[in-house]
Each structure stands twice: as C-alpha cells, then as structure tokens.
Amino acid sequence: MNDCSNVVNKDNNIVCEVELIDEKKVKAVRKKLPQDSLINELSETFKSLSDFTRLKILLSLAEDELCVCDIAALAGVSVSAISHQLRLLKNNRLVSHRKEGKMVYYSLDDEHINKIVNEATKHCKE
Amino acid sequence: MNDCSNVVNKDNNIVCEVELIDEKKVKAVRKKLPQDSLINELSETFKSLSDFTRLKILLSLAEDELCVCDIAALAGVSVSAISHQLRLLKNNRLVSHRKEGKMVYYSLDDEHINKIVNEATKHCKE
DNA sequence: ACAACATTTGAGCAATCATTCAAATGAAAT
DNA sequence: ATTTCATTTGAATGATTGCTCAAATGTTGT
C-alpha cells in the first residue's frame, strides 16, 4: 500500500519505513517539526534542568550571585560535586562566572531559564 | 565565625554545614527557594523533555494525535522503543491515549508543554 | 618560601537509562 | 479456530551520569 521512503534517523542510519498507518498525516506532521539539530539543542537544555542538584543551583542563582561553597551549602552536596555540575552548566551557557581573588562567583546567564522554570511550575501545579 | 546549622539534604541525611562564606546571603536565598518536593517534580518534568526521542514524540503530538507506529516512523526508532518511552510519558502525565480497535492513539495531555518548549527554543536561538 | 584556603580536575564506582530482542496480549479479519 | 496485526512487556546490555575521593591549581596572607 505504501511506498518505501528512505529516511535518515538521528544516528545517520538509513531507515526504510514501510509501516505507516496514516502516511498523509505523518508527512504533514514531519513538515512542521523543527530540525533535528534544534531538537537536539532543546533536549540538551532540558537535560541541564533535569537533575535535582543542578536545578537547585539554578534556582539559587536566580535569586543572587553566589560563590561555589555557598552554592554547595544551599544544595546540600559537596563542593566538588557542585564544581562538576557548575562546569556542565557553564559549558551549556546557563551560568557565567566572575573571579574575585580566590573566590569564584556564579550567576544566571539567561533570564529565559526563569521563564522556562515558571512554565514548568504551572504544569506541576496543574 | 559561623554556627553549625543542621540541614536535611535530598537524601534525608543530616548535613552539618559549617563552611559558609556569606551566611546572611545564603539564608536569604534559601528562604526564597521552592520546596524540595516541587524542585523534584520540576526536575522530573524536565527529565521527560531531556531525551531526543521523547522530545520528538512530544513535538509530534503537539501537531496531531498519532498512533504508535506513526510516532515510531516520525522519530526514526523501533515501535518497541517508542512504546517504552510512551509509557514513561504517560506515567508522567505528559501524554494521554485513546484506544480504537487494535490501534492506540496518543496525544498531548497538557498545553503547558508547548509553552515550556517555546521558551526553551528562545533560549537556544539566543 | 610557606601555609591556608577556594576551587578545579581526573579516575573510579554505583546507579540510572535508552534501546534491542523475543515473547506476550488483545483485537480484527479470514 | 487460526492468522494477522498493533501494541505492550520483561530481561538483557551498553552507555551515560552524579557523586566521592585524592590530588592539583591558583590566590592570599604571613
């Protein structure tokens, strides 16, 4: 019934999809989907927000600029663990930092984060 | 300099935090943070959005109601893999389903998801 | 130069996760 | 009844992840 249209999946493998139920609908939806590269960026952003410790770091930094060991105290985990997570957040451009002698002060890099979290809060509270 | 104020971390262990740099600031920030239970719910929500395949499922369902094998075709992974992910999304109340004979049609359960993704898109596009 | 301190880093480990495979379920068609 | 088909399920596996520990950096104060 349906032709075999070859498609490239996320691992760049050629996939032959013969098993479509509603080919027309599928094609219409596919046309509206964002590019894979954007979906990938989006999922990476959400991954940054998906860990309890990281989210608490970001919520804390949304209130005030903080040094590493104060963040650790707020999050209730070791300084080393926090430092690892801060590096991840820094690489994903969610936080920025400022050095002052021995101290390093971190802050939120993007106000969008607040908006994203606020929308998610609405969802959680239904 | 600082007193030892005992605090309960996310694993319910008592943690003694003596190593504060700016105790006043830390206390002020802590007062403003959401409850751990909410932070946990939020991180779970973001975890649902943090995987490429799951996000593509949700973006597809934002466009139209779809059956399992059409979702699989759109996402470029096996029907079995999709079914596992759909169960996860169903458990987290992000999608709902409707049976029609052999077929099962899935759809988005909450429009907040769209708003969250839209905000995140702004962040990614800077 | 040395000690103290804030932070970073890398290796290692247990836990979690996304997918695959094979088998099971359940509904329609012959 | 039996076959076919859409979907679900459970076990297994390789990959990723968040943390700990020990050691390294780099800065300040003596």
Image (cartoon, coloured by chain):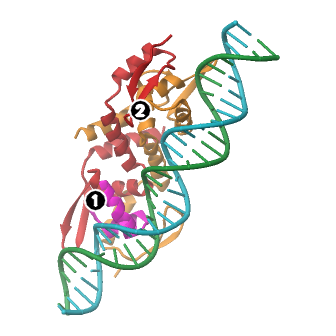
Chain colours: A red, B orange, C cyan, D green
Q: Amino acid at mark 1?
A: Asp
Q: Position of residue D11 (x, y in %)?
A: 66, 46
Residue at position x 51%, y 20% from top? A19
Three-letter code for the amino acid on which mark 2 is drawn: Lys
Tell me the tag on residue A64.
Answer: 1
Q: Which residues are magenta?
A: A64-89
- Vertical order, C4 against B44 (above or below): below
Task: Give the SS element for disc 2.
Answer: helix
Q: Is residue C7 above or below residue A15?
A: below
Dot 2: chain letter: B
Mark 1 — on which chain does it sit? A
Q: Is residue A80 magenta?
A: yes
Residue A98: image quadrant is bottom left
Report the Cα–Cα distance between label 1 and label 2: 35 Å
Q: Residue at x 33, y 33 (%)?
A: A36
Is D2 rendered above or below residue D23? above
Quick one: quadrant of the C terminus of chain B? top left
Q: Are marks 1 and 2 in contact (CB under 8 Å)?
A: no
User: Label 2: which residue?
Assistant: B56
Q: Is residue B98 left or right of residue B3?
A: right
Q: Position of residue B33 (x, y in %)?
A: 39, 56
